[in-house]
Amino acid sequence: LLFSKGGEIVIKKELLFVTNAENEWDEGFSYVLELAQSLKAGIAVLMVMGRQSKNTCEEMIVAAALADEGAPELAREHLNTGQEKRIKEVEAKNVLELTERCKGLAIDFTCEVRAGDAIPLIGETLEKRHAISMVILSPNLSKVLDTRKMTKNITKPIVLITRQGKGE
């Protein structure tokens, strides 16, 4: 995010919030909102869907039939179309909700829903968005990410939001 201040160009910092797009996707977002307000930073959200996102039984049957008939590329395309449809559904619902939560707080907000492995997607996002100063991981990613691999590949500070255990 660029803006001009007295003739010089200033880059406004952003926080990258990474979450699983398919379950408890907004867990930890309240913390990110508070942090963005205190740091006067924008928020970029990366919602990650697994590469082999849940295809419906019907989609799988059609794809299997296409593959049996000698059309494996068409079968793959059919499965990808189902995933693209689910990505659009997530964008329509989840992104709209997060946008509304940021609107009244005057926080710059962007969101992207992508399918694939989280660590390479985070790396790609950091390459595209140079203003990101910190990566914040939702609690819903804590069991699926290899944090050692992540710290080797990502040079920005990484914060993992954790769930508070019972009785704490």
Image (spheres, helix red, strand yellow):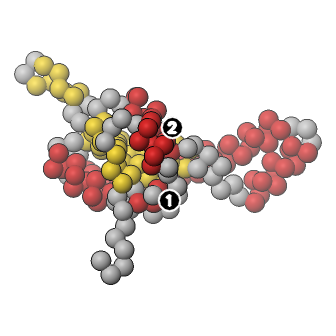
For residue 163, which quarter of the picture?
bottom left
**For marks 1 and 2 on the same chain, the one whose residue lies earlier in the sequence:** 2
The image shows residue 159 at horizontal and vertical percentages of 33, 50
Q: What residue does disc 1 label?
A: 143
Circle 2: element type: helix
Q: Kindly identify the amino acid type of the residue bearing the numbered disc 2.
A: Pro
Of 27 and 94, which appears nearest the observer? 27
Name the residue located 48 percent from the left edge and 43 percent from the top edge.
149
Q: Kindly identify the amino acid type of the residue bearing the numbered disc 1.
A: Lys
The image shows residue 121 at horizontal and vertical percentages of 49, 39
Quarter in which the C terminus is drawn: bottom left
Circle 1: element type: loop
Q: Is residue 21 above or below residue 118?
A: below
Could you tell whether 87 is left or right of 82 in the image? left
Of 31 and 159, which appears nearest the observer? 159
Q: In this figure, what is the number of numbered marks?
A: 2
Could you tell whether 135 is left or right of 148 in the image? left
Q: Is residue 149 above or below residue 128?
A: below
Of 78 and 17, which appears nearest the observer? 17
Residue 120 is labelled as: 2
Name the residue located 25 percent from the left edge and 54 percent from the top edge.
33
Q: Is residue 154 above or below residue 86?
A: above
Quarter in which the N terminus is drawn: top left
For residue 66, which quarter of the picture?
top right
The image shows residue 36 at horizontal and vertical percentages of 22, 48
